[in-house]
Image (cartoon, rainbow, N blue to C red):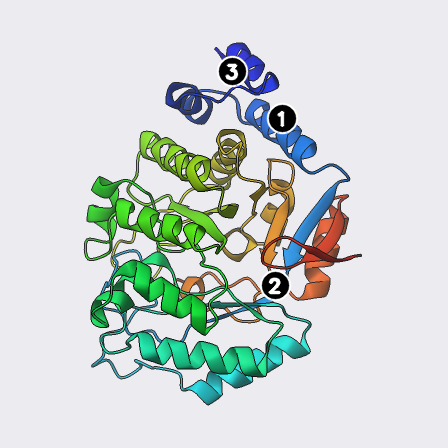
Amino acid sequence: MFEKIAKKIEHGKPLTRKDALFLLTEAELLAVARLADNIRRDKHPGNRVTFVVDRNVNYTNVCESQCKFCAFYRTAEDGDAYLLDYQTIFSKVQELVEHDGTQLLMQGGLHPTLKVEWFEELFRQLKQRFPRVQIHSLSPAEVIHVAKLSGLSMKKCLQRLQAAGLDSVPGGGAEVLVDDVRQEISPNKIGWKDWAAVMEQAHKLGMRTTATMMFGSKESPGDIVEHLFRVRNIQKKTGGFTAFIPWTFQPDNTELGGETASGVEYLKVLALSRIVLDNVENIQASWVTQGSRMAQVALFFGANDLGGTMLEENVVAAAGCSFRMSKNEVIELARGAGFVPARRTTEYEILEEY
């Protein structure tokens, strides 16, 4: 069966769910890695590995969703609940600009009182102060929550946020795009069809987005495959995803608890992502959850991008997983694995090779 699948890939034919499940559950790890690496080489000749200088500003930790896999959220009554004021956010973005940063990844919880006007004013002021910073912010769950609080349709809410300065939408909150799994790990969060609807609407409005997957919690191998095919089908319809980022559930300090996926499982899923998502240009290695050494290995399993330098990251860190990397460390990481590092924008325009 492996040879049949390899031939399909060689001739540019899309895989079936059955093919993907075989690769995930039965095929040998390094054989799958070779398939993924060949696809990466075809799509990204020149041995280039990209990254973006960004900052993840978590504007609030107050969240009504209270997902069981999350160690970051607080209720409004908790003593350590917070909402950043505009000036604090501006000072964080100023620091980003001083580090050659081009991307602001701003995400928070589903706050009970923040309506669309709060974000519109913030985005307008950010654009006035920092016109070169791409506002890559608000997950689909946040967009739908803000729309509901504001009495708007999801489309109208996105249009208003875009007019105020929202440039692109990150793929957070995807977890696994299968509602049975979502019901178990995040029962108060939007279903997979709502996640897809926000992405498709953003693409229609001309915004590019990313797609993610958090695995290693309660999903089956079949659920992972279904997630990948759902992302592939959205991309076939819209072409709006710039990248796909799989990462592993971090169980410490969470209600869900348990174990996370092993490094081997991470690499297998990453390689499968590169193989199945033949219509998504870029696959990111998640050093934020895996660490720098595993991210280097991931570059031989289909990944061509090291994501952001992240001057700040609080959500994964709340689960006890805190890897940090400077721009120079990312450059050396790529070089050390034999690649040519290149700094990019959110939309993968190359700014500088090193």
Image: 290 above or below 60: above
| Mark 3 and mark 2: Cα distance apart in space | 36 Å
| Mark 1 and mark 2: Cα distance apart in space | 28 Å
Q: Is label 3 in contact with label 2 (beta carbons under 8 Å)?
A: no
Q: Can residue 142 be spotted in the picture?
A: no
Q: x and y percent of residue 279 in the render?
A: 53, 34
The quadrant where residue 69 appears: bottom left
The quadrant where residue 109 appears: bottom left
Labelled disc at residue 309: 2
Q: Amino acid at mark 3?
A: Ile
Q: Residues within 10 Å of mark 3 (few under 14, many from 20)?
A: some
Labelled disc at residue 250: none
Q: Amino acid at mark 2?
A: Thr
Q: Secondary structure at mark 2?
A: loop
Chain-order first, disc 1 or disc 2: 1
Q: Is residue 67 left or right of residue 102?
A: left
Q: Secondary structure at mark 1?
A: helix
Eye-nearest disc, 1 or 3: 3
Q: Can residue 332 be spotted in the picture?
A: yes
Labelled disc at residue 5: 3
Image: 214 above or below 276: below
Image: 242 above or below 16: below
Q: x and y percent of residue 341 in the render?
A: 74, 52
Counting every numbered tag in the picture gives 3
Q: x and y percent of residue 62 in the render?
A: 28, 74
Residue at which label 1 appears: 34
Chain-order first, disc 3 or disc 2: 3
Q: Nearer the viewer, residue 309 or 128?
A: 128
Q: x and y percent of residue 29 in the render?
A: 54, 27
Q: Residue at x 45, y 39 (%)?
A: 235
Q: Nearer the viewer, residue 349 or 49?
A: 349
Q: Is residue 349 left or right of residue 354?
A: left
